[in-house]
Image (cartoon, coloured by chain):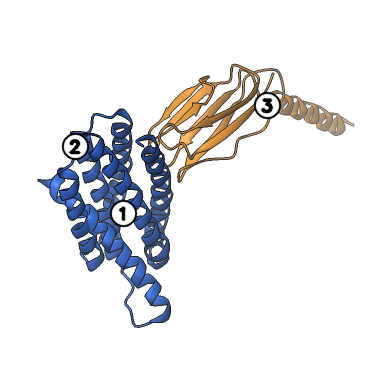
Chain colours: A orange, B blue
Amino acid sequence: MPIRSKIRTGGALAFCFVSLASPSFGADPRVHRIGVDKLAFGTAPGGLHVNDIVEWTNSDILRHTATATDGSFDVDLPAGATGRTILKRAGGVTYVCRFHPGMKGRLEVAP
Amino acid sequence: MFHISSILKISVLTAAVCFAAASAMAQNTDQSTEKPTDPQIADIAYTADQIDIAAANLALEKTKTRAVRSFADEMVRDHEAVSKKVLALLDKLNVKPEDNDTSKSLVDSASEKQVELLQLSGAAFDKAYAANEVAYHQTVIAALEKTLIPDAQNGELKSLLQTGLKLFQEHQKHAEHLVSELK
């Protein structure tokens, strides 16, 4: 019996730990990462919400930007650099690289 | 002087890349034709970048048109970044770029074009520069697709050339847009 209750306690503690660590717990802003390489933006992550952060990492050898076509953000991304923006509005937003307009991405932001 | 001689290289580069593309096609039927080696491919890629930088520097000296300046700035920034990577890769692999007929002909045709451009000014210069950028990028794209990328042996060089191809394609679209803006 003592052994069983120890196991139960341990199980309950482990459950608590998982819940606290889970990103779905609470409404804290999350960071969503998008890679940039070979003149292309990586796939946009799903599950974006207002106040979340989007972080681009430019692994390309060229300087790029992540520039919203509606003017809501303009992130400079020199080669090797990381840049972020906070999502302020719900809805869809298309972004491009100002230097290479053929590079396009889109974020779908839920409230 | 570097500018001028390099710009002079532009037209030559065009011709050379055409030559490279043509010899690449010839290789399909004639197995005896020698493929370019990695040091030669690196030299061609570096030369192609330098020619476009030289042309852009000439444009920055001559033009007063904002769209042309902005295009030329982009060419300098991007092609300097690629050139630097080509040199760094050669250094890492401990090989030296090797001069070759393709690089030479690129330089020769670029030189001719540069002489032409030097004699122009104002709107005539802008139009000639933009039109040449379209043609030049098309030529380099063909060479990258048909010869340089398929023949490159080293994986890092191949990958760098693939980025170069995407860059030249992006620049070509931009150059076409510039041509239509200047009409």
Q: Amino acid at mark 1?
A: Leu
Q: Amino acid at mark 3?
A: Pro
**Residue occupying the point 13% across, 50% down:** B5
Question: Furthest-right residue in view?
Answer: A1
Q: Which residue is mark 1?
A: B89
Q: Quadrant of the C terminus of chain A?
A: top right
Q: Which residue is mark 3?
A: A23
Q: Position of residue A39 (x, y in %)?
A: 46, 43
Res. B121 mark: 2
Q: Position of residue B111 (x, y in %)?
A: 17, 54
Q: In terms of sequence position, does the residue under pointer 2 or pointer 1 come before the other?
A: 1
Query: Is residue B82 visible in this depiction of the protein?
Result: no
Res. A96 mark: none
- Secondary structure category for the residue under label 2: loop
Subunit under mark 2: B
Instruction: Relative to A22, say whether B83 is above or below.
Output: below
Query: Is residue A54 visible in this depiction of the protein?
Result: yes
Q: Amino acid at mark 2?
A: Ser
The answer to whether residue A26 is left or right of residue B8 is right
Instruction: Relative to B70, say whether B25 is above or below.
Output: below
Mark 1 nearby-residue class (10 Å; few <14, some 14–19, many ≥20): some
- Secondary structure category for the residue under label 3: loop
Are the two marked residues, 3 and 1, in contact with CB atoms closer than 8 angstroms?
no
